[in-house]
Structures are given as C-alpha cells and as structure tokens.
C-alpha cells in the first residue's frame, strides 16, 4: 500500500523513483496530474470544432452552417393561405427568403438560414403546410452553403 495516496506511486522499494521524471514525480499530486490531463482533453476537443477533415460531418457544426435552398410545393397550395403560413413558420424559425404563387398552380420560393432550421422548414413544406392545403409533394433544388444571408426577412412575393 502507498503511504501517501496523493503522490505518484511508481517508486522502487529503495524509495527511488522508477518513472522517467525522477524525483519530480514524487512532488506532483496525482489529482493535479489528472486535472492537467482533463484540461488537455477539453482543449483538444474544442479544437475539433474548428478543424475537421473534408467530407466528415459534424452535427453541431452542420447545424450552424448557413444554407440556401430553392423549393416548389405541388398540390392544393393556392387559395388556402399557404404563402401566409409559410412566411409565419419561416419567421418563427428565424429563416429568411421568399415565397410566391406560380402560374402552374404551385408555390415556390427560397429558404436561407442554419441547416437545422432549414431542414425543419423543408419537412413542414412537405408534410404540413397551411390547414386547408393538401400537399402532393415538394421538391428542393440548388442547395448550397452560403457565407451570409441574401435577405433580411421572409417576404411574400405577389
């Protein structure tokens, strides 16, 4: 058993240190050593948020990446306040962009914002819409990462 549990244990029977750090090892309490290792691990893990290999996805970093995506929604989406509900949901999520009716009876537009919020809005456009709408399908095109938002709010284009 150790006489002092707070001191580094690798001491030979004759009292001489058996580790590479010599007598220095006897002076460092084990808890201080472990705290230093913990700080090193914490520091290295924060670096991983800033540096990543190409092609690797990080969910937290992805959620903060700004993206832009064009969309078109098919079905009974005109005359049912679809644009108004789309604007309200987008603003609630903090997204910017626009929405408009088309001559083909669809609704189209563009979403911009953090990836996680845009994904949420894409699901809303595919499955929910306005209360009186009936969505057949939604298509999403031209998705790209952007460095800054092109719009300051979410507009209904008439």
Image (cartoon, rainbow, N blue to C red):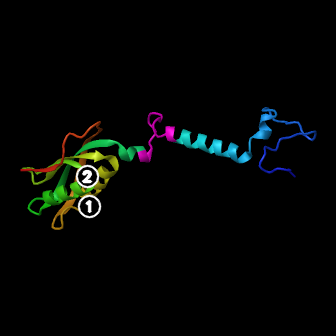
Residue 80 screen position, x and y as percent: 11, 63
Magenta segment: 46-60
**Residue drawn at (42%, 47%), measured in percent from left and top?**
60
- Looking at the picture, tell me which residue is in the foreground, 13 or 119: 13
Magenta-colored stretch includes residue 143: no
Give the spatial CA distance, label 2 vs label 1. Answer: 20 Å
Report helix, strand or loop for mark 1. helix
Task: Residue under label 2, please give it.
Answer: 94
The numbered dot on residue 127 is: 1
Would you call the spot at circle 1 few (<14 residues within 10 Å), some (14-19), or many (20 or more)? some
The numbered dot on residue 155 is: none
User: Within the image, what quadrant is residue 129 found in?
Assistant: bottom left
Q: Residue furthest bottom?
A: 131
**Residue drawn at (64%, 42%), measured in percent from left and top?**
36
Which one is earlier in the sequence, the residue at label 2 or at label 1?
2
- Looking at the picture, tell me which residue is in the foreground, 81 or 51: 51
Residue 1 visible = yes
Residue 59 screen position, x and y as percent: 43, 47
Residue 148 screen position, x and y as percent: 26, 38
Q: Residue furthest front?
A: 27
- Looking at the picture, tell me which residue is in the foreground, 88 or 37: 37
**Residue drawn at (13%, 50%), measured in percent from left and top?**
155
């Amino acid at each position: 058993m150790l006489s002092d549990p707070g001191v580094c244990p690798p001491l030979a029977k004759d009292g001489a240190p058996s580790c590479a750090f010599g007598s220095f090892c006897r002076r460092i309490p084990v808890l201080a050593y472990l705290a230093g290792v913990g700080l090193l691990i914490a520091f290295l893990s924060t670096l991983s948020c800033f540096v990543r290999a190409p092609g690797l996805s990080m969910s937290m970093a992805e959620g903060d990446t700004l993206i832009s995506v064009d969309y078109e929604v098919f079905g009974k989406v005109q005359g049912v306040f679809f644009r108004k509900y789309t604007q309200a949901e987008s603003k609630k999520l903090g997204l910017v962009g626009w929405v408009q009716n088309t001559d083909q009876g669809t609704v189209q537009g563009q979403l911009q914002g953090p990836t996680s919020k845009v994904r949420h809005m894409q699901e809303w456009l595919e499955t929910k819409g306005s209360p009186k709408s009936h969505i057949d399908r939604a298509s999403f095109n031209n998705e790209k990462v952007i460095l800054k938002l092109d719009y300051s709010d979410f507009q209904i284009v008439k």
